[in-house]
Amino acid sequence: MINYRTLIAIDLLYGALVAVGLVFFFVPGILAFVWLGLTAPVVEIEHRGIRAAFARSLRLVRGRFWTVALVLIPIEIVGDSLTDLATSLTHGLFGSELLCEWLADVIANVAFTPF
C-alpha cells in the first residue's frame, strides 16, 4: 500500500530543494533534481520513509548521474510542455486561470506520469 502522506511530504521537500537550488546559482537545482529524482519511486516501490527514500535515491544515482539526467530531464521538459498545451486548451473552456491550470496539470499527470 502506498503511503500518500509520505509521497506528499517528499514532493514538497523535493520541490523546495530543487527550487532553492535553482534560485541559488542554477547548478545546485539541477544536481538536486537528478540526485533526488528517484525519491518518489523509491517510496512507491520499496515502501521507505522520507529520509530513507532520499538516501536511497542518492545511492541509486551515484555513479550514474548523466544516465539518470538523460532520462529525467527530457521527461520533465515533455511533461511541462504537455501541461502548458493542456492549459492553453482548457482556457477556452473555463476562463478561470486557476481552474484551467489545475485541470490541465491533473490531466497531464494522470495521462503521462505512468510512463
Image: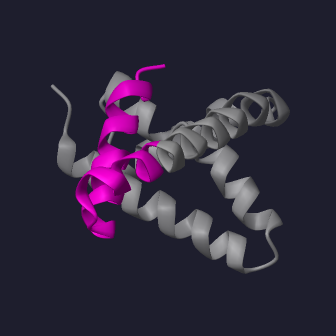
Image location of residue 59, percent across then percent down: 64, 36
**Magenta span of residues:** 86-115
Residue at x 53% of width, y 38% of height: 82
Taking the image as shown, residue 93 lies to the left or right of residue 61, namely: left
> Can see residue 46?
no
State the residue lying farthest toward the front. Answer: 92
* Nearer-the-camera pick, 81 or 96: 96
Whether residue 78 is situated above or below residue 90 in the rendered picture: above
Residue at x 63% of width, y 33% of height: 75
* Nearer-the-camera pick, 15 or 59: 15
Taking the image as shown, residue 69 lies to the left or right of residue 2, namely: right
Residue at x 67% of width, y 46% of height: 35
Taking the image as shown, residue 92 lies to the left or right of residue 56, namely: left
* Nearer-the-camera pick, 84 or 106: 84
In the rendered structure, does residue 99 fall within the stretch colored magenta?
yes
Q: How is the image coloured?
A: one colour
Whether residue 10 is situated above or below residue 19 in the rendered picture: above
Image location of residue 77, percent across then percent down: 66, 42
State the residue lying farthest toward the bottom. Answer: 24
Image location of residue 16, percent across then percent down: 50, 69
Q: Quadrant of residue 28?
A: bottom right
In the rendered structure, does residue 73 fall within the stretch colored magenta?
no
User: Magenta span: helix, strand or loop, mainly?
Assistant: helix
Q: Quadrant of residue 74?
A: top right
Taking the image as shown, residue 72 lies to the left or right of residue 3, namely: right
> Can see residue 13?
yes
